[in-house]
Image (cartoon, helix red, strand yellow):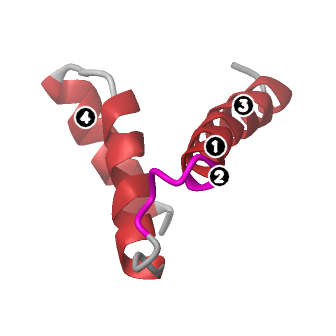
Amino acid sequence: MNREEKKKFVRDLLDSHQEDILAQIDSGNIPEEWDGIELRELIAEKADLDRCSVSRSRRRAYKNTVIVNNL
């Protein structure tokens, strides 16, 4: 993936989550009493559902890169 493809991937994925959550708010499915705490949890759960399984070595390399590059 080149730089532009990576940026498009991130935008598309985050836009999809945003559209879904905003539609849930508009439809009244999100409780009125929820604030940033619950909404952050909802966003995190949606992101977790999009994770794919990766090999142990690729996961280890990913974690190492995150640490080394302070991501």
Considering the whole magenta stretch, tell me its main secondary structure.
loop
Query: Does the residue at mark 2 contact the one at mark 1 (Cβ under 8 Å)?
Result: yes
Mark closer to the observer (3, 1):
1
Query: Does the residue at mark 3 contact the one at mark 1 (Cβ under 8 Å)?
Result: no
Q: Earlier in the sequence, mark 4 or mark 1?
A: 1
What x and y, as percent, mark residue 15?
Answer: 71, 40
Q: Which mark is residue 12?
A: 3
Q: Could you say whether the residue bearing mark 4 is in a helix, strand or loop?
A: helix
User: Label 3 is placed on what type of residue?
Assistant: Asp
Q: Earlier in the sequence, mark 3 or mark 2?
A: 3
- Tell me how far mark 2 sits from mark 4, CA to CA: 37 Å
Q: Which mark is residue 26?
A: 2
Left or right for 57, reference 35: left
Left or right for 46, reference 2: left
What x and y, as percent, mark residue 21?
Answer: 56, 48
Mark closer to the observer (2, 4):
2
| Residues shaded magenta | 25-31
What x and y, as percent, mark residue 4?
Answer: 85, 29
Asked whether residue 58 is drawn in magenta, I would say no
